[in-house]
Structures are given as structure tokens and as C-alpha cells.
Image: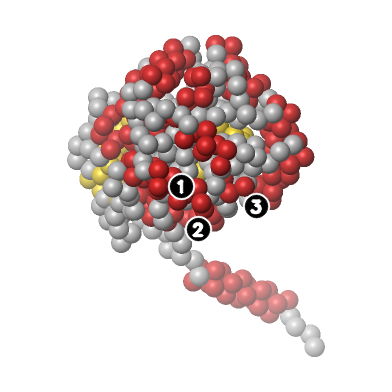
Amino acid sequence: MNIRPSVIAALVTASASLADARSVSHETPQAPAVVLRAAGMIDVQRGVRIEDVLVVVTGDRITAVGPARTVAVPPGAQRIELGNATLLPGLIDLHVHLTLAGNPEANAKATLLAGFTTVQDLGALNYRNLELRDAIAAGTSIGPRVVASGPWIGLSGGICDFSGIGVRGVDEFRRRVREDVARGADLIKVCVSGWLQDAVNRPEAFEIGEADLAAAIDEAHKARRRVAVHALSRAGIRAAVAHGADLVVHGGFADPTTIREMQKRGVRQLPTLFSLTPAATPAAEALLAHMKTSVGLGLPVAFGTDAGVIPHGRNAEEFALLTRIGLTPAAAIRSATLDAAQAIGWDDRIGSLSAGKLADLIAVDGNPLEDLSVLKRVVLVMRGGQIFKGQRAMGKGEGKGERAKSTRQRFASVHPCLNAANGATSARNTFFSTIGSGAKCARAAASSAADTTNSPFSP
């Protein structure tokens, strides 16, 4: 059968038109842009407040930002007027334990509603934190963006040997790293030293063997994973940095030579001062004094709280402690925004209010450059263009999540080795029976009950 070329051309054109029509009919109409107007915005790069600003959000991205007179408002945009509030990038906490101290989903929600739109979870008793990370990413659970390690990796019988997860020997440390990577861990957490009082009493001591430490870091780097180390003693920090650690967790006693190496390589320290210094003990005062000296020497710092030791949702309590070690309000804010984003390699997507970055932002009631406590008064939370707290919170609710009655009660509910000054011995023994770490807790029980810094809070 002969078909004229003109007919073939008509059929091709009709088919193409039908395909186009089907394509158009299945497209999801793009939501209108959202424009937020506020009295001010913190430019975290320069450490200044810009007055009378507009931020334009389209989908999950910031598409324009700046003084209101310079920003064009897209036609049909939804407007949110925030009055005297100040806009900031969503805050970032690089040391949390979402699966400790209560329901993980409630903890994640409390953290997000407190203004922390990204967190780094540095240890769990299993891989539940990775499951929570994935549930939040899939939209089936409410919380911040999560970067997560698997369970702590530490010496058998040591500070992180919860429920017998500790290991010994180079081969076993390498195996644990490979297992965490296979399970989907974003980074590796290695426990190097003991806690604060031990770091004060024995500055040249740390519990992990150098060969084991080197092996764990090498194996992680082969898999293109960063390594965060629990290290407080002078020698522990020195060894970890020398062997290539990427992040030092907790405030500690780095020496000037190590600080220079950290500056050179961009290795940041997470002070976690609110959890480490709940009382004005000699060890706590020694830590604060040393950290202030270290900051003066140029120690790179990023924001971390060890939430799970402190109640989830109270992460912003850390800011006041950062000023005690010499950070200006602008530097403290930057530590929880751009500096923290750089520490996890995400500064191309979060950490500042910039066109093209993810629309993770918060509004607070006041000017945080004048009063950091306003960071505890968050009036709006947006993550990825979706509002979770404040105007039009899309039915997500603004509950504060599960919280303990007090910080000390929260400690007693999750930590195996709380001394008498921190909580009841019965609570410690109960946790002991289910988690276990006898050698470590026996040492803690023998410590001075008057010094709360003896308590090995969650690594």
C-alpha cells in the first residue's frame, strides 16, 4: 500500500502534538513564589544586619534576596510579612543524637521547630539514626536535614563500648568502618579519648591505639567518608589530627601546634560547652579558659551541642557559652551557619541566605547580633521552601516534641555513668543493665561525686 509523503508528515505531526499534550497534561503546576519581608536579615559572611529585606523563594530554592528596594517581586507571589523579625539561614548543629533521650521522631521535630534545619547525628546504639535520616528525606517524618554516622566506633571496654559494640585491633576497626559505610553512614565517628576530668588529669593519655586510630581514619577516607573524633585530651586531639581526622568533637585541650595544623587543614572543633560544663567545677573552668586561649590563637570552631545530653530543642543554649570563649555574636552565628555548612561540605547549598541555595531559613524575634538569646525565640522555620513553624505552617503542627522535666533528668534517663551529682545511681544502674559498659562506669563511679564533669555524657 502506498501512502503519500504528505499523509506521513501529517501523522508524524499529529503524534508529536498528542505527545506534547499528554506531557503538558501530566505536569504539576509550579507553586507560586513566596516572598518574605522582614525588618532585617543577617549576612553571615560579613557579620552584619541588612535592614528591610525581601527573600524570594521558588520551590525549594532561594531565587532572590536583598534590600526590599532592590528585589523584584514575581507576579502572583504569596507574601509573608514578618514585621520586626530578623531572618537568618537555618541553623546547623553538628553534634546531636536524635535517637537518644526520648522518641526519635519527636526529638527531630523539636530540633527543627527550634530553628535547626540541618543536624549531624554522631552516634546511635544501632543504625536507627540512618533510618530516621532517610524517613525525613522521604517526607514521611518531620525534622531537619540529617547527616549521620552509624554507631560509635571505639575500643572494647572503652568510652564508647555501649552494649558490647567496642572493637580491638586494626582489622576490627577497619571492618567496623566498612560495615558503617555499607549501611549508608555519611561519615564515621571514632572515640579517641576519655571525658573532661580525665583530659584534665591525664593530658597525655588517650585510650585508642594509634595504629587502630590510623587504620579507622584511613579506611574511612578510602571510602570518601569524613571522620569525626571524640577527643578532649591534649594528646588525643594531637594524635587524631595528625592521623587525618576531619572534625574534633567536644571542647578540649588542643596545643598551639595542633591548632596551627587544624587551621591549615580546616579541621574544626565542636565545643559542646553547654553539655560539658553544667556546673562551675575546676575542670569546667579549666576547659573554658583553655578554649578561650585557643580561639584567640585561631582555633577553627563550628557549632555542636551533643543534644540528647541536653534536651532536644534547646540547642540554642550553646550560643551564650560560645561568647564566653571569645566568639563575637557574629562569629557564634556564623559557627552555626556558614562555618558548619563548610565543615560538612554543604556550603554550596545551605549556610547563608543566597540566591540558588536551598530555602532553609528562620526568623527570630529581635536582632541576634545585639542579643544572642533571641535565637531561642524562633517565630518562623522554613526548610526547603516548606514552612514548619510560623505563618501557614501547612498543618505540620508546632509542638515542641518530647522533653524531660530537666536537663539532669534527661541525663539520668540515657547515660550509663552519671555520678551522684548528676542523677540517681538507680537510673545509672538501670541503663547499665540494658546498655552496659562496666569498666567505664566503674571508673566513673569511683570519681568525685562533687564534680559533674566526671560524668561520661553521650559521646
Of residue 224 and residue 306, the one placed in the foreground of this image is 306
Please state the horizontal and vertical placement of residue 446, each as a whole percent of the image: 48, 31
How many other residues sit within 10 Å of disc 3, few (<14), some (14-19) or many (≥20)? few
The tag earlier along the polypeptide, 1 or 2, is 2
Q: Position of residue 134 (x, y in %)?
A: 53, 55
**Secondary structure state at the residue bearing disc 1:** helix
User: Would you call the spot at circle 2 few (<14 residues within 10 Å), some (14-19), or many (20 or more)?
Assistant: some
Labels 1 and 3: the sequence-earlier one: 3
- Residue 332 location (% of width, % of height): 38, 26
Disc 2, SS: helix
At horizontal 73% and vertical 44% (from top left) the residue drawn is 175
Among all residues in the image, which is located at the extreme right?
1
Mark positioned earlier in the residue sequence (2 or 3): 2
Percent x, y for residue 256?
55, 11
Residue depicted at x 30% and y 51%: 400
The residue at which mark 1 appears reads as 429
Residue 183 is marked as 3
Q: Marks 1 and 3, how far apart in space?
A: 31 Å
Q: Nearer the viewer, residue 268 or 139?
A: 268
- Tell which residue pokes out farthest to the bottom in this image: 1
Name the residue that disc number 2 marks.
135
Q: Amino acid at mark 1?
A: Asn
Is any part of residue 346 visible from this angle? no
